[in-house]
Amino acid sequence: MSNNISEILNKFEKCSLSEMDSVKLMNRVDTKYILNKMDFLEIFEELYKDYFCLEIEGKSLLSYKNQYFDDSIFGCFHDHHRKKTNRFKIRIRKYIESDICFLEVKKKKKGRTDKERILVDGFVDKLDKKNLSYVQKKIKKEKRFSPTLWNDFQRITLVSKTEAERLTLDFNLSFEFEGKKKTYPNIIIAELKQGKANRTSVFFKELKKRLIRPYRISKYCIGTMDLYSNKKIKSNRFKKKYLYINKLNKAC
């Protein structure tokens, strides 16, 4: 798979982080999909004429590490499970190649994603007073949070040449916490990030041709189900999706 990806990546015109600034889309509409290897490679081959590919220090296949936080009753997970219209997730994300970390508060409100973040030194055992205050201010709640999950993955980021649109392609996902680990080597999570929903997107059209529909589930929710099934978290609404993702992971 990696050799094929490299060959296709070479066809893309590259862009830098600074050139991608015009499509940061910190407030946006996200549409998420789960793909298998075969579909991913077929679709990826069709995109190089219409998208730039982000490149940092000569690399387009970039590595990320997330440290997620939740409260003692997994409120962030359960808000997503209940389809709460106003919800949030908290994480520290490290961009490995750039060696930069951000504390991020990712809020979902009426179908839109709003992400706010501040630079931090690195991962933590607990949020200090300053960072906890930042989170509480953004969510407007006096809650306390602890680390609950580590998530590693690799990402390719594409930027539309004509639209306010970014496309992230995440693969080689793994989740880990306190000795438990789960990996997903055979699936790709694709996320279309747009200023407003645009079904004329080249990527959207390629998926539609293959009858691939949006799949709404977050990496945090997948990992939480993997590692905390013994904690009696309520996950029945996600069960069908979770079983499908695991079936797709084993099938390739």
Image (tube, rainbow, N blue to C red):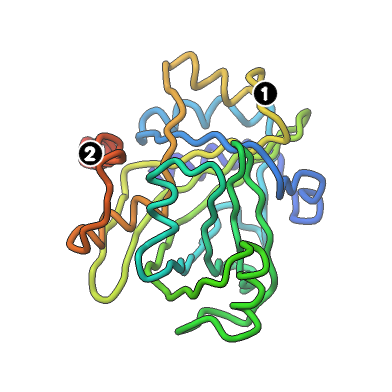
Give the x, y percent position of residue 182.
26, 59
> In the depicted view, which residue is nearer to us: 55 or 251?
251
Kindly identify which residue carries mark 2.
Answer: 243
Q: Residue at x 71, y 33 (%)?
A: 160
- The label number, if any, that marks residue 76 in the structure image: none
Q: Residue flagged by tag 2: what amino acid is it?
A: Leu
> Where does the image place residue 220, in percent across and percent down from the top left?
41, 55
Residue 198, label in figure: 1
Q: Secondary structure at mark 2?
A: helix
Q: Is residue 213 above or below residue 234?
A: above
Assign a secondary structure to mark 1.
Answer: loop
Residue occupying the point 59% across, 36% down = 111
In the rendered image, the quadrant that contains the N terminus is: top left
Q: Is residue 55 above or below residue 212?
A: below
Q: Residue at x 71, y 45 (%)?
A: 27
Count of numbered marks = 2
Pick whichever of labels 2 and 1 is earlier in the sequence: 1
Quadrant in which residue 213 is drawn: top left
Give me the residue at 59% from left, 55% from top.
106
Q: Position of residue 26 (x, y in %)?
A: 71, 50
- Image coordinates of residue 133 in percent, x first then y, are 64, 77
